[in-house]
């Protein structure tokens, strides 16, 4: 098997990965835009026309907004392709809004959805499709927060009253105590395809091949990007299904696309040596992306961050309005025992996801990755003869980036600028921008945990929410 594999590895061409199944083209028989299956009613000024009637041919750029809308509703201009047809992205948004109102029969439904004064060039082909506007979310700042000797005002986008006020109180206590210390213990994005082998013996042979030919796989993987660098490969077998978890550095990008592209290239090395093995999917859910999983909690994904601080007892009393003993007792009963009773995976905290989501929205991160990025364990201990409080949070799978995706949008980029972490890390920097962002967010989580736990231990939670989270 080893001789065969080595020979094939040296002689095989770099053929594309063979997937188990694929669709070569869209099956137009399923399209809803057919006379036999009309989807919508046209707007009132052309309601007397037959649905999807053929309209006079004209260049889209020569048509009025009303004529363009009519053609979109009729299916003569593809709903998703208006921008390309009229070569004006702002106008395309206006046309699509009108088409949505006509297609749904809900007049003025988009009236309160803003669409002006927005750079649609920045999102087209990158951030969103079928655009009809944008949803403003209030952005506030928590802080100042002292992290590794540097002060930050942390942007948070949220509609939950009291969240930023509470987090700011935690920031005050941490900063008065000398600030937060942080470490990033691992930085690796993962992608885990699932392969189907003929039987378990071949599955085991593939695992041995991966182990013995790591250098060849690494070279193919790293050759896809200036930044993707393979760190390790781990195999997990379930019957004849083989899940191969590739973990890699991705520079300042969050790195999902980078890891996926590199993984597909690496898979070609395996399928060239084992043509009888089929790739079922590039993701087999062992990655694990946007889902809770023990493997992320144990192995990590993205940035693995730990932060801590020791807070003098007098600050606990004066700022947090509680005691060290009360906080430690509550943390054990709620965050540790309570979460264990609930069968939680990575949920040993009070509300880490509140802070993570607010920071993600403000800085252009993927909000769906809050699922794993909010995995967190909060620990509190009485130290110095019970007088002071040691508090920490450990977050093993914080998935953030400072380039790509939503970080390119002007408002989100401005918030990254506020933190001093936008874009690619400058040459000679002692840490990457993306790692610094992870440290800041984890430190803000620590502030949020500290303040909420204090409110719970002192019985102030409901009164503060009624004061700040209810419209008077």
Image (cartoon, rainbow, N blue to C red):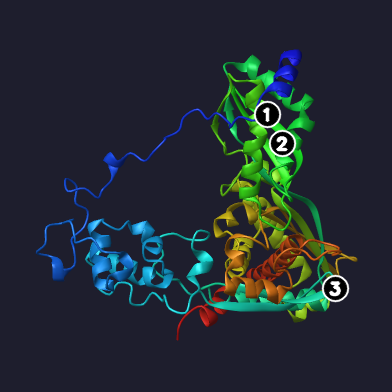
Tell me which residue sits at (73%, 54%) in the image. 303
Mark 1 lies on residue: 269
Q: Residues within 10 Å of mark 3 (few under 14, many from 20)?
A: few
Quadrant including the N terminus: top right
Q: Position of residue 65 (x, y in %)?
A: 28, 72
Q: Earlier in the sequence, mark 3 or mark 1?
A: 3
Pick the quarter of the image with the C terminus: bottom left
Q: As displayed, is residue 277 above or below residue 356?
A: above
Residue bearing the label numbered 2 = 220
- Verify CB contact (< 8 Å) between mark 2 and mark 3: no
196 vs 258, left or right, is left
Label 1 or label 2, whichever comes before in sequence order: 2
Percent x, y of residue 318? 76, 81
Quarter occupied by residue 404: bottom right
How far is mark 1 from mark 2, CA to CA?
8 Å
Q: Element at badge 2?
A: helix
Q: Gap between marks 2 and 3, in whole Å?
A: 41 Å
Near-viewer residue (309 or 259): 259
The earlier-in-sequence mark between 2 and 3 is 3
Which one is nearer the viewer's eye here, 10 or 451?
A: 10
| 259 and 69: which is toward the camera | 69
């Amino acid at each position: 098997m080893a001789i065969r594999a080595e020979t094939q590895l040296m002689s095989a061409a770099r053929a594309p990965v063979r997937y188990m199944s694929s669709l070569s083209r869209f099956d137009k028989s399923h399209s809803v835009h057919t006379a036999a299956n009309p989807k919508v009613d046209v707007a009132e000024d052309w309601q007397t026309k037959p649905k999807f009637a053929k309209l006079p041919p004209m260049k889209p750029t020569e048509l009025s907004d009303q004529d363009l809308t009519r053609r979109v509703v009729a299916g003569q201009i593809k709903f998703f392709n208006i921008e390309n047809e009229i070569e004006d992205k702002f106008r395309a948004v206006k046309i699509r809004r009108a088409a949505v109102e006509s297609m749904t029969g809900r007049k003025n439904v988009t009236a309160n959805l803003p669409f002006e004064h927005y750079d649609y060039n920045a999102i087209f082909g990158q951030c969103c499709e079928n655009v009809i506007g944008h949803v403003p979310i209030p952005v506030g700042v928590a802080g100042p927060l002292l992290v590794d000797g540097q002060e930050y005002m942390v942007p948070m986008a949220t509609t939950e009253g009291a969240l930023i006020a509470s987090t700011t109180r935690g920031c005050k206590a941490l900063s008065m105590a000398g600030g937060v210390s942080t470490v990033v213990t691992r930085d690796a994005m993962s992608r885990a395809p699932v392969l189907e082998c003929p039987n378990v013996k071949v599955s085991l042979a593939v695992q041995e091949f991966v182990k013995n030919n790591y250098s060849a796989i690494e070279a193919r993987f790293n050759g896809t990007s200036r930044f993707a660098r393979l760190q390790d490969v781990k195999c997990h077998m379930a019957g004849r299904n083989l899940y191969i978890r590739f973990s890699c550095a991705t520079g300042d990008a969050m790195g999902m696309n980078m890891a996926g592209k590199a993984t597909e290239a690496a898979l070609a090395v395996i399928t060239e040596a084992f043509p009888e093995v089929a790739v079922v999917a590039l993701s087999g859910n062992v990655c694990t992306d946007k889902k809770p999983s023990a493997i992320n909690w144990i192995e990590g994904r993205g940035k693995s961050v730990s932060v801590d601080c020791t807070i003098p007892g007098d600050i606990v009393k004066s700022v947090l309005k509680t005691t060290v003993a009360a906080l430690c007792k509550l943390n054990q009963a709620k965050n540790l025992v309570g979460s264990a009773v609930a069968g939680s995976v990575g949920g040993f905290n009070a509300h880490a996801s509140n802070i993570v989501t607010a920071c993600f929205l403000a800085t252009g991160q993927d909000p769906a990755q809050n699922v794993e990025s909010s995995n967190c364990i909060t620990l509190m201990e009485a130290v110095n003869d019970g007088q002071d409080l040691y508090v920490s949070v450990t977050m093993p799978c914080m998935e953030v980036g400072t380039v790509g995706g939503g970080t390119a949008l002007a408002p989100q980029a401005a918030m990254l600028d506020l933190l001093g972490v936008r874009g690619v890390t400058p040459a000679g920097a002692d840490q990457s921008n993306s790692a610094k962002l992870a440290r800041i967010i984890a430190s803000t989580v620590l502030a949020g945990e500290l303040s909420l736990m204090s409110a719970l231990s002192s019985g102030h939670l409901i009164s503060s929410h009624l004061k700040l989270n209810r419209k008077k």
